[in-house]
Amino acid sequence: MAVSAAGIKPGETVYDLGCGDGRFLFDAAKRTQAGRIIGFEISLLPYLYAKVKTLIFKDKRIKVRYQNFFKADFGQADVIYCFLLPKTMKKLKSKLWREMKPGSRLVSYVFSLPGAEPAGESLIRDKNLPIYVYRF
């Protein structure tokens, strides 16, 4: 559901902030023609698990970085997906507005971006949880 809400177009670069085991990355690879799909994770075990999955999945578009996403350049992303707690969303807001290029999108699962009006919102039917889409 989050992948379809993102509206990923062929050739676009997709980031997943705090990608965990890489579920969104692999779903995006299966269901879209994104050019690059990059996950950022700073927790060692989920990072290693996602890294091993990239070796098994064998899709060269998927990369997993053991890196704090606050140090990443968001200007390269067309779509950013995240499932982050409100405190982190608040901290992330200024970086997004500073670095996101015009026309790029943020897709946030469950938690909204404080003080920003989403361009769209949908619910995951079986869980009744929101997905917010912001356009820059």
Image: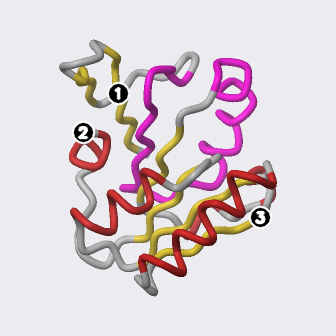
Tell me how far mark 2 sits from mark 3, CA to CA.
26 Å
Q: Which residues are magenta?
A: 85-113
Disc 2: CA contacts within 10 A as few (<14), some (14-19) or many (>=20): few
Quarter of the view holding residue 27: bottom left
Picture coordinates of residue 97, whole percent (x, y): 60, 43
Residue drawn where x is 79% and y is 48% of the image: 43
The residue mark sitting in front, 3 or 1, is 3
Disc sitting over residue 1 in the figure: 2
Front position in the image: 77 or 38: 38
Tell me the distance, in whole angstroms, between the alpha carbons under discs 2 and 1. Answer: 9 Å
Q: Is residue 72 left or right of residue 84?
A: right
- Residue 52 located left or right of residue 124: right
Q: Say if mark 2 contacts mark 1, CB within 8 Å.
A: yes
Q: Which mark is residue 66?
A: 3
Q: Earlier in the sequence, mark 2 or mark 1?
A: 2
Q: Quadrant of residue 130?
A: top left
At label 3, the amino acid type is: Tyr
Q: Secondary structure beneath disc 1?
A: strand
The amino acid beneath tag 1 is Ile
Binning the other alpha carbons within 10 Å of mark 1 as few (below 14), some (14 to 19) or many (20 upward) gives many
Residue drawn at the location 26% of the way across and 28% of the way down: 120
Q: Secondary structure at mark 2?
A: loop
Q: Which mark is residue 131?
A: 1
* SS type, badge 3: strand
Q: Position of residue 37 (x, y in %)?
A: 46, 69
